[in-house]
Image: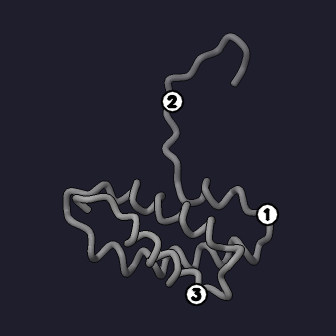
């Protein structure tokens, strides 16, 4: 931000912003593929009154946290779904 200039613009976080912490293009590709695969499965199980964007972002955070231990995209997606469902707030 420029000195003396305030902005009332609110930037919504996104999975892409979460993935910006990754430096390796291979990790980014793995994270995106795993997020898409896991989200495809999870989204169908969510209730209509859920904020889908915030839940997808929560899943993206989980994906990023699991990259160091996952063997491949499929393993990363599986682990992310398991963790997401284990920590899912009530009402989802």
Q: Earlier in the sequence, mark 1 or mark 2?
A: 2
Quarter occupied by the C terminus: bottom left
Quarter occupied by the N terminus: top right
Task: Report x, y in % for residue 47.
Answer: 21, 65
Q: Which residue is mark 2?
A: 9
Q: Which residue is mark 1?
A: 23
Q: Secondary structure at mark 3?
A: helix
Task: Report x, y in % for residue 87.
Answer: 40, 64
Task: Report x, y in % for residue 63.
Answer: 57, 69
Q: CA distance from mark 1 to mark 2?
A: 27 Å
Q: Earlier in the sequence, mark 2 or mark 3?
A: 2
- Please report contact status of discs 1 and 3: CB closer than 8 Å, yes or no: no
**What residue lies at 52% left-to-right and 48% top-to-bottom?**
13
Q: Which residue is mark 3?
A: 75
Q: CA distance from mark 1 to mark 3?
A: 20 Å
Q: Is residue 47 left or right of residue 16?
A: left
Number of numbered discs visible in the structure rendering: 3
Q: Nearer the viewer, mark 1 or mark 2?
A: 1
């Amino acid at each position: 931000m420029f000195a003396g200039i305030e902005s009332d613009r609110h930037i919504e976080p996104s999975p892409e912003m979460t993935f910006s912490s990754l430096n390796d293009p291979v990790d980014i590709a793995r994270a995106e593929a795993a997020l898409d695969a896991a989200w495809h499965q999870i989204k169908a199980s969510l209730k209509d009154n859920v904020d889908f964007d915030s839940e997808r972002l929560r899943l993206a955070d989980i994906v990023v946290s699991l990259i160091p231990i996952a063997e491949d995209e499929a393993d990363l997606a599986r682990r992310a779904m398991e963790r997401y469902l284990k920590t899912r707030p009530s009402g989802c």
